[in-house]
Image (cartoon, rainbow, N blue to C red):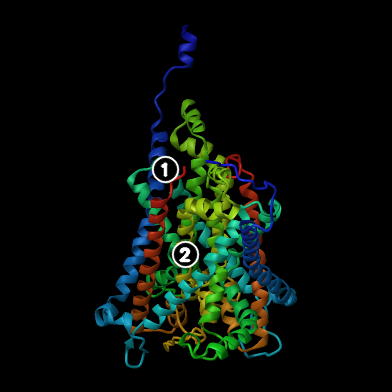
Amino acid sequence: MNYTTQKSLTYNPSLTRNIGNKALNIASALFAIISVLPLILVISYVLIKGGSYINLDTLILEPEPPGDDLLSAGGIGPAITGTFIMSVIASIISIPVGVGGGIYLAEYSKSGKFAKFIRFGSNVLAGVPSIIAGVFIYAIIVSTKILFGSMFSGIAGGISLSILMVPTIIKTTDEALKLVPNDMRRAAFGVGASKFTMITNITLPAAFSSISTGVLLALARAAGETAPLIFTALFSRYYITSFDDLFYEMGSLSVLIYNFALEPYEAQNQLAWAASFILVVVLLSLNILSRWIGTLGAFSKNKV
Amino acid sequence: MDKASKSKFSLKKRPTSEKLVDVGFKNIVVAMASMVAIVLFSIFAVVYYESTESISRYGLRFLFSSAWNPVTDEYGAFTAIYGTLFTSIASLLIAIPLGVGTAIFITENIIPEYIRNVIGIMVELLAAIPSVVLGLWAVFIMEPFIRPFLNIIFELFGFIPFFGTQPLGAGMMPAILILVVMILPIITSISKDSLNQVPSKLRQAAYGIGASRWTTIFKVIIPAAISGITGGVLLALGRAMGETMAVTMIIGNSNNFSWSIFAPSYTISSMLANQFGEADGSQVSSLMYAALILMILTLLVNVFAQWIVKRLSLKYQ
């Protein structure tokens, strides 16, 4: 038999396989362009359209009730503070729970049955639709008036947001602590450190940057959420003036966008665009910041 | 050893306070971890408990009726369930080729690496835009822009029931498109990660026996990464089913069942967002029943996703 056939080894662009390859290269490039297009469109519309409505009054004033004044709708000041306060409440609850849970998974029970179950559970909790978290908090806090008789409140809103943050924080803490080499743990035990000292002085600081990345990402997701807030914090047009106001309805940027986008008045719609400008700028900066922090740590994913 | 060094290195018992701190810390951490399980179970328990009235009254009939009448207390979630499944699956069918294609484009060396990195980061930043902002964009920019195109489809193919009504603004089709935008980053980034994890030996072996780039991708790389890609697709499906705000703003919120994708419709989550505020009595219970159905659907998808990733992965590690 003769295995040698006389064919040229030089690249021949008219071969079917080469034409096919080219076509598929172009197709995949096209898909990539289509995927990036929405981001560019959304961001440019929000920045240009929203940015044009931003001025000092919009940032500070309280929003006017729709239809009162057709020319001006006031501002988004209370919504900005409301989003900030509820994010802080959500962080106060979810950071200890999430970091604590992550420490348990990574340091105490690496592959025990309970740890497996908790890992599974936090993945499932991450997949629970955000609106269900709102319905849940509505049922146990708002409708039962368990918080000192208050119904819709900023605190209830913060709690519902914390449910969305916990799974992300647990997961990143767990993974960050697992990347810390075991040598460091043995060295700490070797010089007589207790487990508590080892965790708080050695492994947590070593994993700090990765954990903060997770916390910031979780915060960025929670701050933009609307669905849980419409049943828990509702909306308010006023600034909070005292601690007691935490137990009453509280406005937020995302609910303001939702409410005012559906109003038939131009002034309110403009306010919704202005609010999206602020929200998108803050969330994108949080995201970029978290990426940057993630590259700093000694044991971050990108370096190992 | 002389006496001095002996006393220097003598064994010392741990003080009780240190032990207490150690045990206490462990207990706190265990309690924090248990919170996840407690919250998850109580979400199920509370939603189930709140919907018992509706479950006992309507039973499975709730799933197949599209009545929604607070006056006569007749409730059924067929339109919403159909809307949820149809919008999420249709958006998935559009987003899978786009997302996986983009992921392949980013992981192959067709163009220089820094451009690919920029594209990858941009797609991931898309995930950072809150859904209510996407909804605002969809209502004011996207929907008016695509309406003429939808009208052309209606005029040409209006005899097919799926295109049977005139597009008049909010409807199922814009909702599907905005869902595509929302789930693209999930599919792309998870597919990208799993394509990157395929060992380069496999690719070199395929090139070595004369396979072209795309033969290698279709016959070697994608089969090796299929577990991660499937997992990502299922996660995206779960996300699409539970997505609320953007869909609520653009789907039109109508409980009248229609085959047409241009007609206003409902999803379970948009029904909740719309009606929960002013509902009372048995309507709340019916909404809770719908929420329970949504929870079970997303739970099934998520558990299946985790199972499939475990089942199919570890082949090439």
Residue B277 location in percent, x, y? 45, 81
**Mark number, residue B137:** none
Residue A127 location in percent, x, y? 44, 62
> Callout 2 environment at 10 Å: few (<14), some (14 to 19), or many (20+)?
many
- Judging from the image, mark 2 belongs to the subunit labelled A
Residue B135 location in percent, x, y? 58, 76
Q: Nearer the viewer, residue A23 or A276?
A: A23
**Does B103 sit above or below residue A180?**
below
**Does B41 sit above or below residue A291?**
below
**Does B234 sit above or below residue B280?**
above
Residue A241 seen anywhere in this rendered image of the structure: yes
Question: Are both tags, 1 and 2, on one chain?
Answer: no
Q: Secondary structure at mark 2?
A: helix
Residue A87 seen anywhere in this rendered image of the structure: no
Residue marked by disc 1: B25
**Mark 1 in CB contact with mark 2 (< 8 angstroms):** no
- Judging from the image, mark 1 belongs to the subunit labelled B
Q: Which picture quadrant has residue B283?
A: bottom left
Residue marked by disc 2: A159
Q: Residue furthest front?
A: A1
- Name which residue type carries label 1: Phe
Q: Nearer the viewer, residue B199 or B171?
A: B199
Q: Residue furthest top?
A: B2
Q: Residue furthest left?
A: B56
**Does B54 sit above or below residue B18?**
below
Query: Residue at 31% across / 66% down in the picture?
Result: B45
> Callout 1 environment at 10 Å: few (<14), some (14 to 19), or many (20+)?
some
- Name which residue type carries label 2: Ile
Tell me the distance, in whole angstroms, between the alpha carbons under discs 1 and 2. Answer: 24 Å
Q: Nearer the viewer, residue A259 or B269?
A: B269
Query: Residue at 59% across / 63% down in the picture?
Result: B128
Query: Residue at 49% across / 52% down in the picture?
Result: B225
